[in-house]
Image (cartoon, helix red, strand yellow):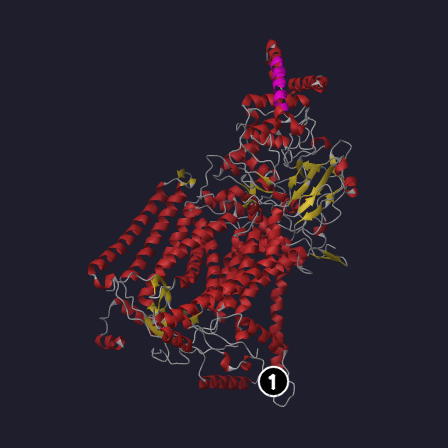
Amino acid sequence: MSSQDIPEENLPAQQGHAHGAVDVADEKNPFADPGLPPHEHRIQDIDEEAAKRSERTVALLFTVSMLATIGFIVSYVAVPHDRSIYVFPIGHVSALNFALGVTLGLALFCIGAGAVHWARTLMSDVEVADERHPIEASPELRAKVHEDFRQGAKESALGRRKLIRNTMLGALTLVPLSGVMLLRDLGPLPGTSLRHTMWSKGKLLVNMNTNEPLRPEDVAVGSLTFAKPEGLEEHDEDFQKEIAKAALMIVRLQPENIKDKRELEWSHEGIVAYSKICTHVGCPISLYEQQTHHVLCPCHQSTFDLSDGARVIFGPAGHALPQLRIGVNDEGYLEALGDFEEPVGPAFWERG
Amino acid sequence: MKKLSARRRHPLAALVVLLLALACTGGLYAAFAPAEKAQADDTAQSLAIDEGKKLYTVGCASCHGTGGQGGSDGPSLVGVGAAAVDFQVSTGRMPAATSQGAQVPKKKNIYTRAQIDQLAAYIASLGAGPAVPTKEQYGPEGADIAKGGELFRTNCAQCHNFTGKGGALTKGKFAPSLTDVEPKHIYEAMQTGPQNMPSFPDTTLSEQNKKDIIAYLNAVNGDETENPGGLELGGLGPVSEGLFGWIFGLGTLIAVAVWVAARTAKAKKS
Amino acid sequence: MSTTASNTSRSRGKAPGGERVADWADGRLGIYTLAKSNMRKIFPDHWSFMLGEVCLYSFLIIILTGVYLTLFFHPSMNEVQYHGSYVPLQGQLMSEAFNSTLHISFDVRGGLLIRQIHHWAAVVFIAGMFVHMMRVFFTGAFRKPREVNWLFGFLLFVLGMFTGFTGYSLPDDLLSGTGVRFMEGAILSVPIVGTYISFFLFGGEFPGGDFVARFYSIHILLLPGIMLGLVVGHLILVFYHKHTQFAGPGKTNNNVVGMPLLPVYMAKAGGFFFLVFGVIAFVAAIAQINPIWAIGPYRPDQVSTGAQPDWYMGMAEGLIRAMPGWEINLWGHTLVLGVFIPLVLFGVILVAIAAYPFIEAWVTGDKREHHILDRPRNAPTRTAFGVAWLTVYFVMLIGGGNDLFATHFHLSINAVTWFVRISYFVGPVIAFIVTKRICLGLQRRDKDKVLHGRETGTIKRLPHGEFIEVHEPLSQEQLHTLTAHDQYKPLQLGPAVDENGVERKVRATQKVRAKLSEAYFGEESQIAKPSVEEYKEITSGHGHH
């Protein structure tokens, strides 16, 4: 930043700097500043009747405000909080909210309108010029401050007694570390928790809607079902944490429509179970188009092809949805054949 | 014509299956209904199928094939059931225009109630499928609205929005708004999964679940639904709220600021 | 002057009550010294100078209503069953945070109104800051001595966004929860430390049971506390620097023309507070915002389409939606570029506008104070840069709402996304070029007006049959106003060899600077304003029509 290199003549002449405060227009410079135009009177300045009218308007506005406040209090007391009214063109709204809002708005607006009308019509509107002064200190003051500082610094002997300076800097650098340490218990270390879900071998796939374990014959081609692992109930303390990883989306495809070999292997009679959690940033992805077998994320439009290993075909997701390997147990219920083989949900540094 | 008569056995065979199914599912009704009446129903039913077939040949066969077996322009209708016919035709989606965009939209229905029933009877006769739901199935009695809300958020909101205002799907397809859609049609859509919508058969979304969902929708997206805070702004969330805040909130404030800062009218110069 | 007069005429004990109180306070606080320089301080009148006031007042409204809301809100994620008066949620499991927000909305009289005022005021606050910032940008009000205040304002804008985001997340509803989940995913994408930061922020795995309480203290204490300090600093600097003004007769770089704080500005600014509050209360009476009861309580396995953040996070949302899904796996680690790049770009785009004043100051090398505002046309490169920046911003806002654009205009969501991806690169370039052309055109028109007068629209027939339009010469006020702006000359690097024929060393930074200076002030980038000589030649040449 060496703007000293800029020659002065490159900078345009600034008004006021070049010519003193206000130029007087003359023959030489038709563009010179003619100075503040003379003040013109408003109607209210010369016509007392008009001024009176303004006064009455202001007083009226303040009065309306008072009435509106009374209206607010009356509404608060008189309107039941569960009353619904139809207000054209807004629709069915809470009577209380509408009444309180309109009266409060009116009470406040009228105070403001009154004050501004008063200022605009009755207070002096003569424009005044205020001088500006440079912000920079004068060279003498600048020198004085620098001198004072040097004096103080010298008296502290900080520069001379290096041992004091260095140990002090060391202490001041270290002391915030205590604060940083204290943040350690904000949460546990990640460990491998993002790699595991509740799913394990033999866990039944429980229908989200009916809370019953699913059988293969329940799942029709073209249908969409959501499932959770057996043993996870909505009122469990860690329900939110577990469902955030374990939620499943189950669809049935015609086995001949499945293009991915592994997908077919991990399916059961064309029934495939995919993680419902988007691999982009974790929205529950479930906009399943049964004819295209595409599933779209409503948050950022990542699109996956469920007939081809849930490969990403559009949008910002970086990898396919993890598939859960499923089978059928002796009693004819769908079960997991293990946990997901890769972490579900958004990618992270340690994912690999 | 010869081809048609050769196939005559097919629908009749299917009719027997259908009647059997009716006898089982509607057991209660059948048990108490007088025998002669059932007989009369049978005749009425086969008449309806015949009428339906005529309608089908005129309006549907060009895409779905003469026997509902499907073609390059339309899927097979064997086994889709009466519910699918009632949904597609009553909402005007079928018959579709010859060149559709990404998806067949809702439009004005051109069939009468009786014609739709006849068409439905014919399609149902091609293969067993979900029947048209009854009022008891989709009516509000015995529904749990709150449970319906939870089910709606799990199964429906991802495409149709929190309160059923609709949303976008891939490549120009969309999940339509559910405002002003008849409960019966919502029930049928869940049962049959029209177009790209997945189906939610009774095995995974029970009849009671469907009833709950319909009751919830009626509560949050019905004619009488209250929006206590005022204008709903489309019920679309922060995008429309942001637009409103910019245009009406900030816009009004800027208009007010212009008034505050404007010069007061001067007395006339002369 | 008048104080000495009143001092002498005043005898002890007889002064009016107000004066006695003021005397008491002055003896302890020195208020008279403060009042001397500030009570009759001059403020210029222009509607665009009130945009900052919109922000200040909506900030005050947010604090007032926010304090009220804290009286009823429970920042806890304990699960409870709902038994309030909103039927469609009866018996549902939800967090206490959501439950208490429903309580505020349905069972506290006026609670819904205050909630809506709070939220609408937040939307207006940040929109107001955005427009205010653009006003300051396009008029060059950020130049010396106001760079620090520009940064204060920028920080307020950024902190406002995050305060808004944390507040939006507090009710723990399905929409905001989805937003928080996005935030978790974005944090996870940070290389090396992302997973740790996420676990520390959420107290373990998402969603955990802590984030509402933590966001609460950030939302009501940490961020607003910093913002309050910045607002005070911002205002002190406005008073200290005195307001800028547009060029005009009597207005110079050494004065400020307007009306005194007492009484006119006090009444106008004070009144404006009530006007702003009134308008926002009215908006809250008629328009619903964030109906969490319709949205439902948060569950990580549920979602709704149209999941968007409040508008001020829309730019980030657009970036994340438009980004292709790049992911690099190397040596057992994952670099989540598809999320991390938008995260970085979000910061870069914001910093670009914040850093601009310093870049411009470096290019011009101008170290003088500037109190006269530029008309945007007279700084074409700056204006073009600003419009290009706005283009990026608004393209990304469209990207953030791509699903709603698709459904409402019957477009393919994929097409909208591709439009956003391409416009992100092409849009600002086109905007830059077009804006600069328009600015130069307007400069030319100003020049014509100065030299040839104003077109009156009156057509006159000259004796020899020619038709001409009568041009009316401008008044001196207008002539002055249209020629008052600064025009820089491009920086010259000087000859490549000095007088002794030795090659001069020119540093690379100097070369860059000269290039930029040429781009800013070269012949392509500004129309030389009319000189006195040109004016005289034309006016004396063929006289007035």
Instruction: Examine the structure image and report whether residue A98 is included in the region drawn in magenta.
Output: no
Q: Where is B97 relative to B43, above or below?
A: below
Res C319 seen here:
no
Dot 1: chain letter: A
* Residue annotated with mark 1: A161
Q: Over which residues does the magenta segment extend?
A: B42-57
Q: Position of residue B122 (x, y in %)?
A: 64, 21
Q: Nearer the viewer, residue A329 or B210?
A: B210
Tell whether C5 sits left or right of C293: left
Where does residue C503 sit, x and y in percent of width and height?
65, 85
Residue C528: image x %, image y %?
Answer: 47, 73
Q: Residue furthest top?
A: B36
Residue projecting furthest to the front: C464
Image coordinates for residue C334, horizontal then vertical, percent: 72, 57
Q: Residue at x 46, y 63 (%)?
A: C135
User: Viewer-proximal residue, C432 or B196?
Assistant: C432
* In the image, residue A283 above or below residue A116: above
